[in-house]
Image (cartoon, rainbow, N blue to C red):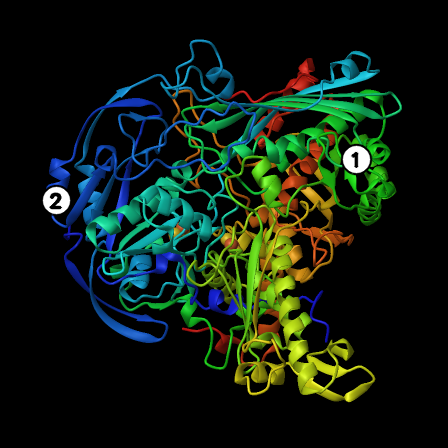
């Protein structure tokens, strides 16, 4: 039975559904202590004095650490993406604030005690005298002359200034039509359902540290934590067991994991820290947060000739691990989207503010890019009175143009963009929708359609490119395939799935290639002592890059097994075929030997061909030749309630092309989950700070995560266009949902509101905001840009 | 007012096992389950009773374990996700969750399963919109809920189809 392309039930599920998962917070180590952080209540303040005597004396307290205690003992928290040519101004990020706190949530002290209760009581006894300073919260304020400076060591709040593309002012000067929009890409708070956690244990005999952590990339954490602690890398082991979602927020190296490790080494006792949800809101990196001026130049016939983008990206108080790469490389190079737009220019200013650091959040840069081009295309279509679908069709990159090099010199691998669009429109039944819309409008109902044709850049990525764009790591991936004497298979992979299901999909790949049953295969990940190397799970890279390494390692195993089989069958290697788990001699199918038999022979080594070593194991490192470029078309039908401003998504159709599907059920799960997060940004989610830098949306009561009740069923369809350079042909699918869904829903709502003359509105489209826009329009002040009125 | 940490006697049944305990009066059920009994399937995902990851059954009703004091459950029967499967195999809800891919990272899953158990006990044949409303107390960041809704529908059908009705629910 073919196992690739089947919706095989996940092997992860049973342990997770029966309460036998092992999440970091479930860990108990003998003699463990509990750590909690004291965090700044102010967005910007000088620490005048910090007194810990009373707290230290509290029963059960083992240690209290402040910034001063760490000076010279641990290094600052690093930034690991340094885009060249970006005038990057990296400042020191101490794990605990030294004399200045720079955002609400900035850690000031760590308390370690016998129990959580004792730690909490002691924390209350720490006295901090703050001298509150003026704070800057918004990017525009932060760039004003005389704005309070987040870092005294810098002349301004500018963290980076990056440009790409060519000068397009000619194209704009001579254009028949130009459209311009201001986009507020609001700040989001990731909120995986599992908060972050870390448990560290030091072995004084081995002088080694074990860190269990909620990590998307344990090997990166090993590298960064060992360097901050100044411990040799081989004496640090990082283990990510079951991880409850990440969405980018568990990539970064945070102060917390480092501090817990430091305390375990100092105190020679295991130390455990578990983030509280309200702590997550301020202490875990946020996502998005741009203010953009975006422009499109085109002709009346619908041809797009140029795009120009100026973006201010709020990076928060410190540059988190990957932060500088997100609004530059992962955003700027793909703002022309799925369209053949010859000229484009992007300018990005990354800005320090007194807010929680901003880093990757599902899609990281690509949702922002897709949003702006999709908004511009709709605005352009409206301007020239053309159907937005027709404008898309006219400008989509055509099949014969692949591989297609875009205006920023990146090369899209493969695509059939029109086919995905056709399939979505067919599923939608566009003519019927148009009739319904006409009828609805006659009744005064606000029904709208949004269609997005997107491409994204993922499968991160070629290491050479990683180096060229300043990522301080490689992006290749590693796999080791170990065949045991009984023919059972162990795979060690460098990716670190936390919900994406690779324990199942990778087993399917193994089963497909080796012909062995799924039950005979174990996929191991997440432990740096077990897995040689890896760069982790993010950027929709696990199956594309990690799967590539796996396929290569499997081929090597089969190659060696084939030589042993030839020897056993007394045939020439060239005459050996391998199918369905059996090696046979071409033309003599009765002369055959099973893979398991060969595995045993390899281990017994009683009779091996000359030059073949005993055992059966192979490893491979796969460094992709290019990124992969999934694409597709999403469509949403929405209705807006005139009286309440409430938006209801009535239909949602997703056509995604991520290459061949290894497990369609898992792919669809990724798509649906991502779409709901994307809808969340369009309609509900948004971090709100007041002007003093207090986060007002600082709990699950104040920050609206999508709930089942407000969501439509999602129709998921696919086209399958393999990536020509990937060993499995796959492209990755973890982020397409958040990339495509937000502009799809936003364009649908704006289409619904168009009869009222409303042409723009900022996210999230909460009932209040939509209702105000409708009210203003009905009062005759419509058509203006109803902008984000808050910060 | 009793001292919040002075031990209080309580007798309760957890996953079918009766326990006589002396517990601090301020101990939450979620803490009792996770720390005292090491039943770590009950997850804690928030501090404002929003996420529902801690949901368990108390006397057949789904309850957020982070909102209840353990000592208030004298003579109650508590069922956690560890008590859902039966000796002969997965509970129909669990089987349907796996078949329909209703979990990804699995962190919300114990609470979602126990919420669904509470829902199906009260409403054996819920419509999709009743299921969606019934999931109001839980948050899942991974799945987008649709497969959860489908799995609960499927489980409801298979429970109805199976003879024995109520026997399916652990107590
Ligand atoms: S832990 Fe979130 S509701 Fe109980
Ligand atoms: S499966 Fe991850 S939160 Fe629900």
Q: Residue furthest bottom?
A: A590
- Specify the quadrant of the image occupied by residue A178: top right
Give how far apart the Cα atoms at labels 2 and 1 are: 68 Å
* In the displayed structure image, the side of residue A233 where residue B73 appears, left or right: left
Give the camera-side residue of A30 and A193. A30
Using residue B12 as the reference point, say whether residue A591 is left or right of it.
right
Q: Secondary structure at mark 2?
A: loop
Front residue (pair A617, A414): A617
Looking at the picture, how far across and down is residue A16, in whole percent? 48, 64
Residue A585, how many percent across, how many down?
A: 77, 83
The reply to whether dot 2 and dot 1 touch (C-beta < 8 Å) is: no
Residue drawn at point x = 57 percent, y = 73 percent:
B159
Q: Which residue is mark 2?
A: A58
Query: Who's the residue at 25% across and 47% down the image?
Result: A263
Task: Tell me where residue A158 appears, x and y as whole percent.
Answer: 48, 20
Residue A514 image offset from top left, x and y in percent: 66, 74
Tag 1 subunit:
A
Some atom of ligand 1 lies within 8 Å of the CB belonging to the residue at label 2: no
Check disc 1: other Cα within 10 Å, few if <14, some if 14-19, many if 20+. Answer: some
For the residue labelled by badge 1, is the local secondary structure a helix, a strand or a loop? helix
Work out whether mark 2 precedes mark 1 in sequence or the reverse, and give the earlier one. Answer: 2
The residue labelled by disc 1 is: A440
Q: Is residue B110 above or below residue A718?
A: below
Q: Which mark is residue A712?
A: none
- The reply to whether residue A322 is visible in this rendering is yes
Q: Where A485 sits versus A694, above or below?
A: below
Image quadrant where residue B55 sits: bottom left
Instruction: Give above or below for A280 relative to A696.
Output: below
């Amino acid at each position: 039975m073919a196992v690739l392309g089947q919706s095989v039930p996940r092997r992860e599920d049973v342990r997770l559904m029966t309460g036998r998962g092992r999440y970091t917070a479930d860990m108990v180590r003998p003699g463990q202590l509990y750590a909690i952080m004291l965090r700044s209540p102010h967005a910007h303040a000088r620490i005048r004095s910090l007194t810990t005597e009373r707290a230290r004396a509290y029963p059960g307290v083992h240690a209290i650490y402040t910034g001063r205690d760490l000076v010279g003992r641990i290094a600052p928290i690093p930034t690991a993406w340094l885009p060249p040519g970006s005038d990057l101004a990296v400042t020191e990020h101490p794990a605990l604030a030294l004399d200045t706190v720079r955002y609400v949530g900035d850690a000031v002290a760590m308390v370690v005690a016998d129990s959580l209760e004792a730690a909490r009581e002691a924390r209350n006894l720490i006295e901090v005298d703050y001298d509150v300073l003026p704070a800057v919260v918004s990017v525009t304020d932060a760039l004003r002359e005389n704005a309070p400076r987040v870092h005294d060591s810098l002349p301004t709040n500018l963290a980076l200034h990056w440009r790409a593309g060519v000068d397009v002012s000619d194209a704009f000067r001579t254009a028949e039509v130009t459209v311009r929009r201001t986009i507020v890409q609001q700040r989001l708070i990731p909120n995986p359902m599992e908060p972050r956690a870390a448990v560290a244990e030091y072995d004084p005999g081995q002088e080694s540290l074990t860190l269990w952590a909620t990590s998307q990339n344990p090997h990166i954490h090993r590298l960064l934590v060992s360097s901050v602690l100044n411990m040799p890398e081989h004496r640090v082991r990082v283990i990510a067991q079951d991880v409850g979602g990440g969405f980018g927020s568990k990539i970064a190296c945070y102060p917390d994991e480092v501090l817990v490790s430091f305390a375990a080494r100092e105190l020679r006792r295991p130390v455990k820290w578990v983030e509280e949800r309200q702590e997550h809101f301020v202490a875990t990196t946020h996502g998005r947060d741009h203010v953009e001026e975006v422009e499109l130049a085109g002709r009346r016939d619908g041809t797009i000739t140029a795009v120009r983008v100026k973006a201010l990206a709020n990076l928060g108080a410190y540059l988190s691990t990957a932060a500088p790469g997100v609004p530059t490389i992962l955003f700027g190079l793909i703002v022309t989207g799925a369209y053949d737009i010859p000229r484009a220019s992007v300018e990005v200013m990354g800005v320090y503010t007194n807010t929680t650091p901003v880093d990757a959040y599902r899609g990281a840069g690509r949702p922002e890019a897709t949003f702006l081009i999709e908004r511009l295309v709709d605005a352009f279509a409206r301007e020239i009175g053309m159907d937005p679908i027709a404008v898309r069709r006219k400008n989509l990159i055509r099949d014969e143009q692949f591989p297609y090099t875009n205006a920023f010199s990146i090369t899209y691998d493969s695509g059939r963009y029109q086919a995905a669009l056709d399939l979505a429109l067919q599923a939608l039944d566009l003519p019927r929708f148009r009739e319904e819309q006409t009828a609805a409008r006659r009744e005064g109902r606000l029904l709208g359609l949004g269609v997005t044709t997107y491409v994204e850049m993922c499968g991160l990525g070629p290491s050479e490119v990683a180096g060229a764009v300043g990522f301080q790591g490689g992006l290749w991936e590693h796999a080791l395939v170990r065949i045991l004497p009984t023919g059972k298979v162990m795979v060690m992979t460098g990716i670190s799935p936390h919900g994406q299901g690779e324990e199942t999909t990778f087993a399917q790949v193994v089963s497909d290639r080796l012909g062995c049953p799924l039950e005979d295969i174990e996929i191991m990940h997440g432990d740096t002592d077990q897995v040689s190397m890896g760069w982790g799970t993010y950027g929709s890279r696990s199956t594309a890059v990690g799967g590539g390494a796996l396929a290569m390692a499997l081929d090597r195993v089969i190659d060696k097994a084939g030589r042993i089989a030839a020897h056993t069958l007394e045939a020439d290697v060239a005459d050996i075929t391998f199918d369905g788990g059996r090696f046979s001699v071409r033309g003599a199918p009765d002369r055959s030997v099973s893979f398991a038999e060969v595995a045993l022979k390899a281990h017994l080594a009683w009779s091996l061909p000359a030059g073949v070593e005993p055992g059966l194991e192979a490893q491979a490192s796969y460094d992709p030749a290019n990124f992969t470029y999934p694409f597709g078309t999403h469509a949403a039908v929405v209705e807006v309630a005139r009286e309440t401003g409430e938006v209801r998504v009535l239909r949602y159709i997703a056509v995604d092309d991520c290459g061949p599907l290894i497990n369609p059920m898992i792919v669809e799960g990724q798509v649906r989950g991502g779409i709901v997060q994307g809808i969340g940004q369009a309609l509900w989610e948004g971090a709100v700070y007041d002007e003093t830098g207090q986060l007002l949306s600082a709990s699950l009561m104040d920050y609206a995560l999508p709930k089942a009740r407000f969501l439509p069923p999602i129709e998921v369809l696919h086209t399958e266009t393999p990536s020509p350079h990937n060993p499995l042909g796959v492209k990755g699918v973890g982020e397409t949902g958040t990339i495509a869904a937000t502009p799809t829903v936003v364009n649908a709502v704006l289409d619904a509101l168009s009869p009222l003359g409303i042409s723009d509105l900022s996210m999230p489209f909460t009932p209040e905001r939509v209702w105000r826009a409708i009210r203003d329009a009905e009062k005759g002040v419509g058509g203006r840009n109803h902008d984000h009125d808050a910060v | 007012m009793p001292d919040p940490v002075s031990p209080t006697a309580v007798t309760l049944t957890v996953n079918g096992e009766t326990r006589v305990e002396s517990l601090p009066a301020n101990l939450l059920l979620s803490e009792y389950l996770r720390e005292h009994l090491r039943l770590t399937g009950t997850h804690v995902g928030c501090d404002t009773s929003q996420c529902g990851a801690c949901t368990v059954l108390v006397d057949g009703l789904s309850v957020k374990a982070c909102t209840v004091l353990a000592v208030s459950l004298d003579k109650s029967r508590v069922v956690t996700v560890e008590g859902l499967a039966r000796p002969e195999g997965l509970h129909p809800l669990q089987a349907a969750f796996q078949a329909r891919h209703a979990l990804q990272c699995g962190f919300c899953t114990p609470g979602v399963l126990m919420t669904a158990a509470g829902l199906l006990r009260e409403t054996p044949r819920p419509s999709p919109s009743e299921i969606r409303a019934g999931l109001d107390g839980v948050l899942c960041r991974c799945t987008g809920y649709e497969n959860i809704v489908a799995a609960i529908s499927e489980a409801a059908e298979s429970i109805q189809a199976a003879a024995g009705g109520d026997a399916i629910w652990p107590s």
